[in-house]
Amino acid sequence: MRLRYKAATKDGKVTQGLLEAKDITSAASYLRGKELLPISITEVENRITNYIPFLNRVKTQDLILFTRQMSSMLSSGLTLLRALEILKEQIQNAAMTEVVNSIINDVSEGRTFSQAMEKHSRVFTPIYVSIIQAGENSGLLDKVLSRLADNLEKQAKLKSTIKGALMYPVIVILLMVVVMVVMLIFVIPQLTTLYANLNIELPLPTQILLTTSKLFAIFWPVILVIVIVCFVGYRKWVATAGGRLIVDNIILKLPIFGELIRKTILAEFARTFGLLVGTGTLVVEALNETANIAGNVHYKNAIVAVGNQVEKGVSVGTSMAYSPLFPPLLVQLVKIGEQTGKMDENLSKASEYFEREVDQTVKTLTTAMEPFIMIVLGIGVAFLIISVITPIYSLISSIQ
């Protein structure tokens, strides 16, 4: 059972948190074993957030704040355990509080910081854990956490930029679909009865609209089933190796969007690979870990191929030059970094370059899509107006 406790330390300070125990007595014994005097132990009430996972999860901003604050406290000379205990009292997110509390318990029992994090794979990615482990091994955990926080902030900013650019067209398209469905279900059937009573010859646009509405009204269950079957079938097909290859290849070749996705992948690759190399991770291991977050199977295969070449003694830059997926600029920066011993710095510069390119592409995309969306909306509205008004106008003209 999940319990919330409040206890006093030896020096009289009050601390509180969450823990898992089979009953209150076991929890009290556990606290006394940690040299804490239990003040109160209560069972955590079941809330709606316990049944709806997305309401009770650790967000990216929570992780960034955790990483940044841990870096600051360790830099100021606090021990890891003391820093975690202070941070636990400041966290507002209940899910993050549970994670930190679990880490505190594991660290208290002798596990390393990275080992304690491995239990929470939904919060801390394998790359995050690897970077923390490298920081522990080098004795520069505070500096590694600072760089990791910077990396997470840049990653969050990049995702936010792309989401912001896509939000407008997605909302417009959804509204268009909703309006069309409402028209076909509620409005057009009423007009069908009206036009039938008028007994006039209908123009082609009106006939198309009425026929579409009639078919939709009769066969909407069939249409819904077909849509669901197609969606499920697509998901299963994409989950296969062949399907994923085809879809990812099509995505990279999309006009404008393909280039945007390509630059986003390159920015993530350069930033993460540079961070891993900068913290002392072996190059081959860093490449293999970076490949898992590529987000596109073609880039994943290309990065793994680079790692295989490096294992054979080929330099990273030369290995990357064999693949057309890596632009010459990135290849040259990596080669220069290998020669000067500053590959992590050069990769950081490359990631900043691709991030600027993403920002510029997003601005161009947003600017270009606004008139396109307006044209599509105008055509749709014009078709509806012509289809609805033309028969009525024809009737009025014939009466006159």
Image (spheres, rainbow, N blue to C red):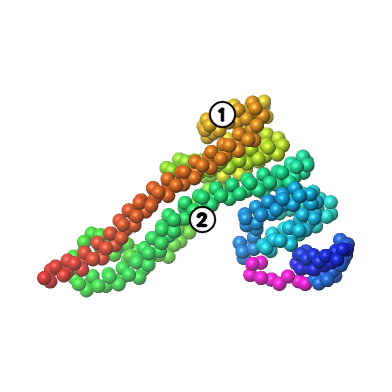
Judge by depth and name the residue closer to the eye, 22 or 101. Answer: 101
**Percent x, y of residue 50:** 66, 67
**Residue 147, numbered circle:** none
For residue 348, what is the image quadrant? Answer: top right
> In the displayed image of the protein, which residue is found farthest to the left?
400
80 over 320 or under it: above or below: below
In the picture provided, is 167 more to the left or to the right than 303? left
Q: Kindly indicate whether the residue at mark 1 contacts the one at mark 2 (C-beta within 8 angstroms).
A: no
140 over 36 or under it: above or below: above
Residue, x 53% and y 48% (percent of image)?
238
Q: Circle 1 — which element?
A: helix
Q: Circle 2 — which element?
A: helix
Residue, x 42% and y 49% (percent of image)?
366
Q: What is the number of callouts on the image? A: 2
Mark closer to the observer (2, 1): 1
| Amino acid type, label 2 | Val
Judge by depth and name the residue closer to the eye, 279 or 235. Answer: 279
Q: Which residues are magenta?
A: 42-50
Residue, x 81% and y 72% (percent of image)?
40
| Amino acid type, label 1 | Gln
In the picture provided, is 39 more to the left or to the right than 218? right
Question: Disc 1 designates what residue?
Answer: 332
Say which quadrant the N terminus sits in.
bottom right
Question: Disc 2 designates what residue?
Answer: 232
Residue, x 71% and y 44% (percent of image)?
144
Say which quadrant the C terminus sits in.
bottom left
Q: Evaluate whether residue 148 shows in this view.
A: yes
